[in-house]
Image (cartoon, coloured by chain):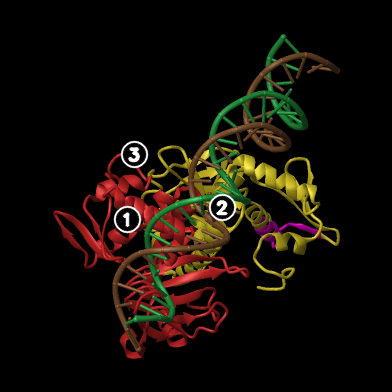
Chain colours: A yellow, B red, C green, D brown
Amino acid sequence: MLDDIKYYRSYEAGQPIVWSGDRMDFVASVVTGVASLSQAMEDGRTQMVGLLLPSDFLGRPGRDAAPYDVVAVSNLTLCCFRRKPFEKMMMGTPHIGQRLLEMTLDELDAAREWMLILGRKTAREKIASLLAILARRETSLALKKTEDGMVFELPLTREAMADYLGLTLETVSRQVSALKREGIIILEGKRRVLIPDFDRLQMETGDDADGGMMA
Amino acid sequence: MLDDIKYYRSYEAGQPIVWSGDRMDFVASVVTGVASLSQAMEDGRTQMVGLLLPSDFLGRPGRDAAPYDVVAVSNLTLCCFRRKPFEKMMMGTPHIGQRLLEMTLDELDAAREWMLILGRKTAREKIASLLAILARRETSLALKKTEDGMVFELPLTREAMADYLGLTLETVSRQVSALKREGIIILEGKRRVLIPDFDRLQMETGDDADGGMMA
DNA sequence: CGGCAGTTTGACCAACATCAAGTTGGGTGG
DNA sequence: CCACCCAACTTGATGTTGGTCAAACTGCCG
């Protein structure tokens, strides 16, 4: 069983987990916290290309070197398996591979939604989209969803949000302020976000003309 | 065997294959030609999120509805399998699922490279990156690679390139003209591209400081 | 010889980046 | 306990890239 070979690792916010090109001899699943995958260009420009929340999978069976920088965005606990035993187990248990395929296909879908955001949305729509994605993700887990709206802890700094969205942190700050000024979001401190009317936020994402009746 | 249930379908350049939300009861693999996956926003903005070249896979086992618009960019031949028999076969043949997982992981990597392009590269770097990607893909297949450089048939219109890169077709046209003016690419007609010095093109992608020695 | 899709080019403009000060607030050491 | 410090954030002034709108060009097909 998988349980026999698993172990846990913890990281503090900001700590690197692996650098692009490093040998990576484990795969893992996020237990708590948030991690990011990023690509960097020589001149320092970086783009986040993956955001791992609890239950997400990290690593690629059958590949030695990490293709991205992986960083703990918040305090983070991973549940790890050494790669070789994990791969061996995958051989014997097709069910695991099938589950992994499903998860990978979901990630691909998310990446493609993200591409639309990066390629075609305005700064304001990008911010709204990110907040909507985070709110939705957290909903399915521990989010407080009262009749007054949703509340969640924003796990990203302005810089990380900029990195996610292909913006600068100044633009992120301005657009967040604008959404706040208009009452579409309410900030309690810098990190706690309250969304009084999710449909109103959804409208700002540009994803649909009406208030969010679709899939 | 897979061969028992496969059949072929052909499409002309520009023809739709499925629309987002349509029921899709087959999966397929591209034999010849090019297809695109695109996401559209209500106001008409669209972003290409997948570009399928020969040997690429189309469709998601275990899902009924297509999540994207699929269009034949050039004349196209697909090798199709009805989805249900294909899924049944996957159950019995873990090898197929493993292959599919590998392909999906590769697609995810490609999507992430694409995200860096969309989020952080300049228009000129975007164009250079796209040309480099196409040239590389075609190299591994049928590309003529002479000592004078590489030649290939550009399978995309300016509009499709713009769609791929998150630009307008005017910007694409200008940047292609600029690369042509500077001798980094040579156009024979509108569609045939000659790359006299691939490393020079590679430098314009922003991906590495030197002439392209890395992975 | 049109006609039309695909493309090129130009003039102008808006969105976002860049550069530059400030501000906030939580943590630390005196 | 308070003063300071520093990272994270906000805000403003200005600059640049790429978008928008408009017009003309190309080449293929009927």
Sequence-wise, the earlier of marks 1 and 3 is: 1
Span of residues in magenta: A132-145
On the image, numbered disc 2 is attached to which residue?
Answer: A51
On the image, numbered disc 3 is attached to which residue?
Answer: B209
Q: CA distance from mark 3 to mark 2?
A: 27 Å
Residue that appears at 51% across and 75% down: B69
The answer to whether residue B59 is seen in the rendering is: no
Residue that appears at 33% across and 57% down: B131
Q: Give how far across and how far down residue B149 sits, in percent.
A: 19, 55
Residue that appears at 56% across and 52% down: A51
Q: Give how far across and how far down residue B98 sits, in percent.
A: 39, 69
* Residue B173 against residue B67 in the figure, above or below: above
Q: Which mark is residue B66?
A: none
Number of numbered labels in the structure image: 3
Observer-nearest of A106 and A176: A176
Q: Mark 3 is on which residue type? A: Ala
The answer to whether residue A192 is seen in the rendering is: yes
